[in-house]
Image: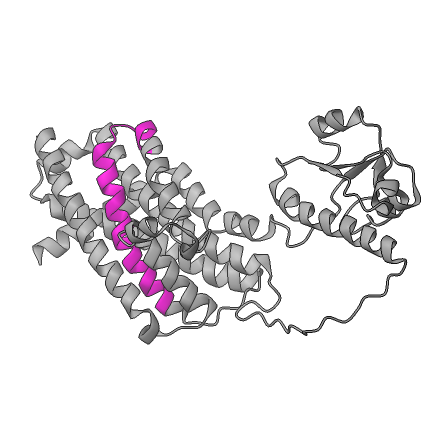
């Protein structure tokens, strides 16, 4: 019981230390409130009022027809500019797309040639550039095809393909963006809080005070794990219930309690990773650089940003050792598809095994660090 009491009291010390750190509190509040809302609503689901400019070097009925095909709400009214104004307009950010219709365009089309229409895109506006490029290609090809046929009538396709989207019928980007942001923030904050707590004690000299107390390295590490994990878990529950379900109106089909249980197992692993990184880094700047090397692969290759099936096989096998891979799979199954424990129990077992392994590795490293300090 003395071990449990020490772990509890040391954890209370960690919570009080966090309460006196206003920057960390601001980071937690932002990450699980405004950060989730911005991630869910910032990326447009469709193209909306994208500025476009057109260089009409042909001045033909076909080019006029193409110009007239661009109108709100997908695009703004096209700006007719000269060829020399394209680079200046893109550099100044006045428009995102610049379409150049070459001379003799209609004549070449009527002659059966394949003239090239140049499309310049400001790719710094990534979401508009990605979506708008496909829109413009379809619009130009459609107008040229209808011009050659002389009619807008469309023939019925031989096969009627009925599309039914499951789990997100309207394909709303906010449904996906909000849930994936909370998953990413759980990983980010758990690593940052535990690693920063250890480095903060080293910088303030309080780690020496702990060394002369009748506490073991296991108790010190376990207190940081449960205290910082509890903070992130409570913030995650608040974000899921208040922000995602309450404000964003994202329907959650599965059990919130089951998801939080899986999040707790995931936090067991990620907080251990944070302590391990805290024993390697000697200052907060070093910890920040190390965090980028660890966090980006954990998030980008876990299956949250892109499907794991699209990755090389050796990457898929390596990422099975990462807790984020199993956490993302579990979270998507529970929150999106309403899966129960009978479906996600393999992910739970994997998180327990990976968490125990990372905890053991971090504890061994932490004991060596304590010995060096002593």
Quarter of the figure with the C terminus = top left
**Residue 87 versus residue 32 in the image, above or below:** above
Magenta segment's dominant SS is helix
Queried whether the magenta region covers residue 281, the answer comes back as yes
> Relative to the observer, which residue lies in front, 220 or 299?
299
Number of numbered discs overlaid on the protein picture: 0
**Percent from the top left, x then y, of residue 289?**
35, 31
**Percent from the top left, x then y, of residue 2?**
8, 55
**Percent from the top left, x then y, of residue 276?**
22, 40
Q: Is 157 positioned to the left or the right of 161 in the image?
A: right
**Percent from the top left, x then y, of residue 338?**
44, 73
**Residue 73 versus residue 27 in the image, above or below:** below
> Relative to the observer, which residue lies in front, 183 or 106?
106
Queried whether the magenta region covers residue 366, the answer comes back as no
Residue 58 visible from this viewpoint: yes
Quarter of the figure with the N terminus = bottom left
Residue 231 visible from this viewpoint: no
Q: Is 58 positioned to the left or the right of 206 in the image?
A: right
**Residue 313 versus residue 55 in the image, above or below:** below
Q: Is 221 positioned to the left or the right of 41 in the image?
A: left
The answer to which quarter of the image holds residue 195 is top left
> Relative to the observer, which residue lies in front, 275 or 206?
275
Give the residues in magenta: 258-287
Q: Is 149 positioned to the left or the right of 312 in the image?
A: right
The answer to which quarter of the image holds residue 349 is bottom left
Residue drawn at (73%, 52%), measured in percent from left and top?
Answer: 138
């Amino acid at each position: 019981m003395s071990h449990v009491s020490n772990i509890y009291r040391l954890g209370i010390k960690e919570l009080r230390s966090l309460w006196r750190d206003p920057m960390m509190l601001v980071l937690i509040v932002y990450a699980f409130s405004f950060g989730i809302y911005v991630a869910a609503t910032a990326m447009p689901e469709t193209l909306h009022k994208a500025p476009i400019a057109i260089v009409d070097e042909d001045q033909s009925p076909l080019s006029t027809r193409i110009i007239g095909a661009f109108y709100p709400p997908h695009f703004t009214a096209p700006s007719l500019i000269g060829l020399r104004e394209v680079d200046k307009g893109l550099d100044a950010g006045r428009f995102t797309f610049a379409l150049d219709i070459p001379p003799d365009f209609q004549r070449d089309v009527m002659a059966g040639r394949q003239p090239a229409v140049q499309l310049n895109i400001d790719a710094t506006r990534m979401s508009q550039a990605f979506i708008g490029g496909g829109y413009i290609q379809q619009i130009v090809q459609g107008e040229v095809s209808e011009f050659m046929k002389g009619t807008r009538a469309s023939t019925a396709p031989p096969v009627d393909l009925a599309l039914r989207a499951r789990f997100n019928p309207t394909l709303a980007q906010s449904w996906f963006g909000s849930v994936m942001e909370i998953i990413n923030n759980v990983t980010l904050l758990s690593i940052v809080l535990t690693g920063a707590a250890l480095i903060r004690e080293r910088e303030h000299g309080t780690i020496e005070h702990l060394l002369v107390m009748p506490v073991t390295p296991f108790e010190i590490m376990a207190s940081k794990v449960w205290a910082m994990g509890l903070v992130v878990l409570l913030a995650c529950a608040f974000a899921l219930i208040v922000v995602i379900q309450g404000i964003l109106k994202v329907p959650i089909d599965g059990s919130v309690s089951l998801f939080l249980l899986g999040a707790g197992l995931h936090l067991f692993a990620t907080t251990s990773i944070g302590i391990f990184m805290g024993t390697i880094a000697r200052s907060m700047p070093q910890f920040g650089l190390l965090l980028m090397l660890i966090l980006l692969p954990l998030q980008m290759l876990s299956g949250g940003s892109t499907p794991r099936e699209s990755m090389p096989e050796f990457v898929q096998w390596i990422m099975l050792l990462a807790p984020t891979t199993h956490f993302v799979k579990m979270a998507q199954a529970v929150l999106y598809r309403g899966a129960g424990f009978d479906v996600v129990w393999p992910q739970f077992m994997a998180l327990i095994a990976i968490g125990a392994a990372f905890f053991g590795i971090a504890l061994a490293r932490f004991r060596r660090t304590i010995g060096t300090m002593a």
